[in-house]
Image (cartoon, rainbow, N blue to C red):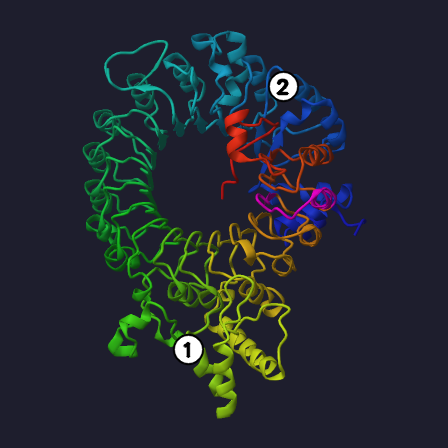
Amino acid sequence: MKELPCEVLSRIFGYLDFSSRREAALVNRAWYEASLDPSLVKNTKFTFDVSILEDEKYFEKGKHLYDGCLCKSPNLQLTGLDENFNAKIFLKLHSSGMYVLGHHVEHLSLRNSSILENTFISILEHCENLKSLDLSGCNSLFMSGSAFLSRLTDRSIVKSILAQITSLELSSSRYINDAILCRFFKLCPSLTSLSLASNNLLCNSLGISKSNSLTFLVVQQMIELHSCNITSIDLSRTSIMSEALTMLSSTKGLSLKRVILQNCKELSDVGMVDLIKKQPGLIELDISGSSELGNPTVCAVSFGAKGLRSLKIKKCQKVTDVSIKHLCELEHLQILDISECFHIGMSALRHGISKLQHLHHLEMKCCNLTKFSEAFISSTQQNGISRASSNTSLVAMSNFHHTSLLPSALCHLEISSSQYVDDVTLQAINVHMVNLEVLRLSWCSSITDFGLLGIEHDVDSVIADETKDPLYQLKIKDFLSTGKYSTNHGYAGLIQRPGDEMSADTLSYNTTCEKVIQQSLAERGIVRLQHLRELDLCNCRKLSDSGLQFVFRYHNGPFKCLEKLDLGMLYNAVTDETLNTVVCGKQQISQLNISFAVVTDAGILNMGRNLRGLNTLNLSNCDKITEQSLTYLSDNCKWIRTLDLSMCRSLKASDVNNLRDSMPTVSTLHSRYSGGANLVSTTHSSGLPTRNKQIPMWNR
C-alpha cells in the first residue's frame, strides 16, 4: 500500500465512511495526504479552534497536531479567534507551514471572532477563491463604524476577493450601520444571499436614514440596486413589520427563492400574504417563532407558492388544522416543520400531510397527536380489534394500514415529546418507513420494550403455538404471574433479570420467548430501520436494559450506519452490559449521550476501545465513573471535541483539570458540580462556579 500513488489511495478512501477515513489518515503521511483529496473533503467542514494557541502549555502538548497541517476542505470555520491573544500567533504559524487558509477555502466562517480590521484583511488575503463569508457576531470588527474599510489601500487589497462572494452573513452585529452595509454591497457586486438576523433594524421611520444605525430604508435601497442578483434574505429576530415586508417584496426585479423570518414578533399575516403574492417563486420559507402569523399565512403559501420545497412554521401557535389541510397543494414540498404548533391535530395529518408524496423531512415535536396510534390500525370491523384494546395492545403486521398516514418516502422523522406516540405507532413506523435515516422519539413516555422489539401484546398465544402441551402452558401462566422483571421495566418473565436462578422449565420457556422476540424483531422491530444515522430515545423511561440489549444484539448488531445515538435519562436501562452491546461493532458512532446511566469504569473502557472516532460524549450525572474513566477516554478517544462531565459525583475538580491537560484538543468541556457539589447551596453561597470553557448542557 505504501507504493500506491496518491490518486489510487484517494479512490480507495472514497469507499470508506468519514470515521474510517479519518482513522486511516493517521497511518502515515502518504495516507494523510490522500485523505485530503478535494473530492473527499468537499462536503466536510474543517473547524480550527484558534484558542488552543493562547495557553503555551496546551499548545506545546498539541503542537504536533498543527505542524504541516494541510487542510484542503473548502469549508473552514475559525473559532476562538481573538485579536489580543491568538490572532497574530495564528497568522505567524500559517506563514511558517500550518496551511489552514489558502486557495482551497471557498466558505469561511469567522463567527463570534474578536478581531480588528487589519487581521480581517490579512485573513482574506490568503483566501483568493472565497464564495461565502460569515462575520456574524464580529462586533469588534465593526466598532470603527463608518471608518470600516474606508482607506483606499485596504479596499484595493480585498476588492478582488470580495467581488467573488455570493453569500454574506452579518448577523448579531452590534455596531453595523448603514455605511458599513453600503460598503459591503459596493465591494460584493455578485451577492445573492444576505443575512442580517438579530440586528437592530430600525423600521419605525421608513423614510429616515441614520448614519450610526441600520435602517430598513438603506437595506431596501441596497437590495433594489442588486435586485437582479439577490435571491435569499434572512431578517430573523429583527423588528421588521408588515409594511416594511410589503415594500421589500414589491421591489422591482426582485425574485426571492429563500426567505428566513424567524421570531419576527412584529410581523402579521398581512405582510406575509403580500410577500407570497409578489414572490410566488419561493422555494424555502422559515417563519418559525413568528407568533402573530396564523392560518391566513399558511393558506397563502399553500395556494400561492406552488414550487415551495421547505416550510418551517415551528412555534406558530395560531396555525390550526384548517390551513394545514391545504398543504396538499404543495406537490413539491420536501421539508416540513410544525413542531410546537399545539392546535395541529390528526385531521391535518390525514387530509394534508399524508398526501405530500415527496416529503422526506418531517418534524412534529410537541404536537397534539391525539389518537395518533389508532390511525395506524384498520377499522374495528376490518380487523376485529376493539377500540379499548387498541390503546394498549399491539397487533400483527397485517393489521397496519398500507395506505400510510405519513408519507412512505420520509427519511427524517421527529415526533418527540408526545404522550400519544406509543408502541403501536413505533411498530407502524418500523413496518412502513424502512428508509428512515433520522428517528427522534425523546420524551415519548408511552413507548415500551414491546414497541422497540415489535412484540405482540398477546404473547401467550404465540408461545402456545410452539408447544401444545397443556401442562407446559399452565407452567407458562404460573411463571407470568410471578412478576419477575428486568433491571428496569421487564415484562413478566419475557425478559429475565440477569442473575436470577431459573429452573429447567423456565430456561425452556425463555428459549421459546427469545425465538418469539427474534421473529418479532424481524417483522415489526426497530431493527428493520437499517438506514438509521440518528436515533434519539432520550427519557423513554419504560425501556429496559434487556430490551435494548435484544435490539443491539440482533444478528451481531443492526444499524451499521448509525452516527448519533441518544440514550440519555434512561437511568437503570443503560448498564455496563447494555453499553457493551450497544457499542460493539459501531465504530462509526460520533455522538453519544448516556447521561444518568449506571455505567462504571469498565463500561467506559470498553466504549473507548470500540468508539475511537467519538466526537461528542455526554456523561453527565453518571455517578459511578471515576478518574479511571477519564484516563480511558484520554488514551482511546483522541477525537473528542465536546465532553460533558457535569454532576458526576465521583469525579473531582483535579481529575477534570488533569483530563484537560492530557486532551488539549477538547474544545468544549462542561464539568459543573462534578464531585458531588450541592447545586442549591453552591448557587446561594458562592455563586455559580466558573471554569474554563464551560457551556450549557449538551444540546441534542
**Residue extending furthest toward the right:** 3
Three-letter code for the amino acid on which mark 2 is drawn: Ala
At 56% across and 67% down in the image, what residue appears? 550
Front one among 553 and 639: 553
Disc 2: CA contacts within 10 A as few (<14), some (14-19) or many (>=20): many
Q: Which mark is residue 458?
A: 1
Quadrant in the picture for residue 501: bottom right
Among numbered discs 1 and 2, the one appearing first in the sequence:
2
Task: Report the residue marked by disc 2.
Answer: 87
Horizontal placement of 389 versus 298: left or right?
right
Front one among 446 and 367: 446
Choose mark 1 or mark 2, whichever is in front.
1
Q: Can residue 507 be seen by looking at this rendering?
A: yes
At 58% across and 68% down in the image, what residue appears? 497
Residue 58 percent location from the top left of the image: 72, 28
| Residue 318 higher or lower than 57, as above or below | below
Front one among 577 and 101: 577
Residue 78 percent location from the top left of the image: 58, 28
* Magenta residue check for 431: no
Residue 678 percent location from the top left of the image: 56, 35
Disc 1: CA contacts within 10 A as few (<14), some (14-19) or many (>=20): few
Front one among 569 and 12: 569
Which portion, as a residue range, is magenta?
616-635
Q: Are marks 1 and 2 in contact (CB under 8 Å)?
A: no
